[in-house]
Image: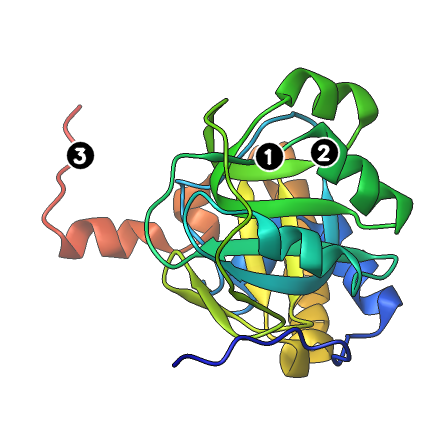
Amino acid sequence: MNRHVVVRTIERADPSVIDELGEAGTATVHEAIGRRGYVGPHITPIQRDTRIAGSAITVLSHPGDNIMIHAAVEVCQPGDVLVVVNTAPSTHGMFGELLATSLAARGVRGLVIDAGVRDTRELRAMGFPVWAQHVSCQGTVKATPGSVNVPVVLGGVTVGPGDVVCADDDGVVVVPVPEAAWALDQTRARLAKEAATRQRLAAGELGVDIYGLRAKLTELGVEYID
């Protein structure tokens, strides 16, 4: 028989580190940490112009059953992001306005889920951010055990309890909690480099020159013809 658990206490990264990673944006963080952590294009936002970051509270659920999401609410703290993964593919609308109301009351910053959500109009109106695989009014049951705050796999990325989840219009990127401070250092360095490059591009320099791509084009056999 499989063991099902709700782990109440987890390690979280420093809140200031989390917030700064969130402000940097997923594309920058993803590139800065070696093009890792992106959970894939199948997880998309139901809203626009929203950028968050928080500590992962992970949920492993049975498809079409949201009982473990309800169980997870109790262990959430301000600044967390709920990450829900199913043991098999699911198109059910496992999350809606009422669960969002409960999470918002506990200071949760948003939801990432590999299944469906419903009440999207209400979720957008209340300002609760969601990144999901589907939008679906298909209902769920509350009958099958799962686990809370265990490692889960989302889009090939392992998400551990407390890992930093960054999410915006470009998608979702996960930074392991032990790497959070290092990831921020890398992100700051990338932002500084991008700022310098932006200035050069704005002054009229070309990317092929800034990045040393002319030699590469020649090596690839590309010819310029006047």
Residue 20 coordinates in the image, percent (x, y) = 80, 59
The amino acid marked with disc number 1 is Asp
Marked residue nearer the N-terminal end (2 or 1) = 2
Mark 3 → mark 2, Cα distance in angstroms: 43 Å
Extreme residue in the left direction: 221
In the displayed structure, would residue 96 be above or below residue 152? above
Q: Quadrant of the C terminus?
A: top left
**Label drawn at residue 50:** 2
Circle 2/circle 1 CB separation < 8 Å: yes
Q: Is residue 104 found left or right of 123 in the rendered image?
A: right
Q: Is residue 38 found left or right of 5 in the rendered image?
A: left
Marked residue nearer the N-terminal end (1 or 3) = 1
In the foreground, 225 or 59: 59
Q: Quadrant of the N terminus?
A: bottom left
Of badges 3 and 2, the one in the foreground is 2
The amino acid marked with disc number 3 is Tyr
In the foreground, 72 or 177: 72
Residue position for label 1:
169
In the displayed structure, would residue 41 be above or below residue 212? above
Residue position for label 3:
224
Residue 9 coordinates in the image, percent (x, y) = 77, 80
Mark 1 Cα shell of 10 Å, populated few (<14), some (14-19), many (≥20): some
Residue 195 coordinates in the image, percent (x, y) = 70, 49
Mark 1 → mark 3, Cα distance in angstroms: 37 Å
In the foreground, 12 or 137: 137
